[in-house]
Image (cartoon, helix red, strand yellow):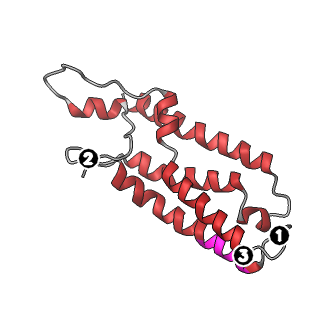
Amino acid sequence: MPCFRPRVITERELRARETPFVAASPSSDDFGSRLIKYIPAEIVGAYVFIAGLIQGLLTEEKSFLSLRGITWLWISVCVFFILSPIYMYNASRTKSEPPQWFQVCCAPIAFLAWAFALGGPFESAMSDYNAAGGSIVLVLVSTAIPALDKLIDRISH
């Protein structure tokens, strides 16, 4: 299966390859590359699309969603939470290399951070929900995941 999503290239992976010929050996990803690759953008995009449909179709008044709409938003969060590691598993493996397990495990966490930042059902579930707080959570999670991976690289070296 071809890799249809960029794999995170870690120093651990480069050491594990142990190739005798080093013609054009790739280097490990820097922090910025890891930051982008750990975000399950396809899953987040699909969630935004579905959440927009739900909010557009099931809004009784312009000010709030009906209980049925909120239920469907929660269902969509759960479905995409479950789909994100499955998608990342398939997206991060190639014929010659196994999936990036850290990338697979972090995908649902990153998705939840995005879903929380976007509001949706979290706004109705939390009386004190604040969009700024959601943005802060998103930034913290999105930067902590690649930083943790880099730390694991350093420890395992």
Judged by depth in the image, the label closer to the viewer, 2 or 1, is: 1
Q: Does the image show residue 38?
A: yes
Q: Is residue 95 left or right of residue 51?
A: left
What numbered label is drawn on residue 64? Answer: 1
Where residue 110 appears, x then y in whole percent?
Answer: 56, 50
Residue in the image at 71% along x and 80% along y: 68
Q: Taking 64 as reference, is 89 above or below it? A: above
Query: Which corner quadrant holds the C terminus?
Result: top left
Amino acid type, callout 3: Leu
Q: Main secondary structure of the magenta part?
A: helix
Are there few (<14), some (14-19), or many (20+) residues within 10 Å of tag 2? some
The residue indicated by pointer 2 is 94
Residue range in magenta is 68-75
Q: Secondary structure at mark 1?
A: loop
The residue indicated by pointer 3 is 58
Q: Is residue 5 left or right of residue 74?
A: left
- Specify the farthest residue to the left: 20
Residue in the image at 64% along x and 56% along y: 115
Asked if residue 69 is among those painted magenta in the image, a careful observer would answer yes
